[in-house]
Amino acid sequence: MFERKPLRSIKWWPLLVLLLLSAQSVCAEQLQVSRFFFDFVSGQIQVSCQIDYELDEKIILALENGIVMHFQTTFELLRKRNFFPDKVIISSSHNFDIKYYALLKQFIVRESHLRAEHSFVSLRAALAFMGKADKLSLGYQSSITEDGDYYLQARARLLNDELPLPLRVQSYFTKDWRPVSNWRVIEVIKDGA
């Protein structure tokens, strides 16, 4: 009575999977550490970086509706090891909170580590301010010994655990609410360490 026809679309499944994966990787590139460097100043390791924020429309809309977004830039000094995972010697985070105030028509950026607030007329200006980190002290140069190879890495991300509950739940299922950059890595050259 019913005749089964072979499923001819099976040959298209690999192409469909590749398209879905490439779409997810495009969505994930909302944050990028474009520049990252360090210097030794008075026995301190100072790091500087530039982060480019290209936020998803959903995040921008949530910001414009008064939702606070919490961003974090993490810096780490690691020592390479042969048979074990690399050891984190120093880890430091630089946190920003951004919120839009409709009555003021301004974006307010809070730097929690400095307990400072800055106001901006546009989102672009606020994100440009958040994206620039200059000469942040990571730790002491004495943390780097002569007998090891070291590297620094930096990454930026939206702290989705700080989102309001409905958005937090949504962030577990879609990458649009979990923007994170890749780790940007630079080798540490021991200049008289």
Image: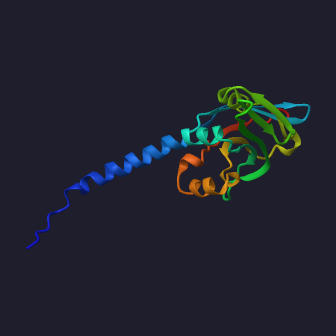
Q: Position of residue 39 (x, y in %)?
A: 80, 30
30 horizontally vs 26: left or right: right
44 sits to left or right of 149 = right
Which residue is most to the left? 1
Q: Residue at x 23, y 55 (%)?
A: 9
Q: For the point 71% across and 25% down, which residue is it?
A: 121
Q: Residue 170 or 40: which is nearer the viewer?
A: 170
Q: Is residue 190 visible?
A: yes
| Quarter of the figure that contains the N terminus | bottom left
Q: Quadrant of the C terminus?
A: top right
In the displayed structure image, the side of residue 8 where residue 191 appears, left or right? right
> What residue do we see at 58% from left, 34% from top?
54
Q: Is residue 18 above or below residue 98?
A: below
At a point 38% along the width and 48% down the height, the residue shown is: 18
Q: Is residue 12 above or below residue 104?
A: below
Compared with 77, 190 (above or below) is: above
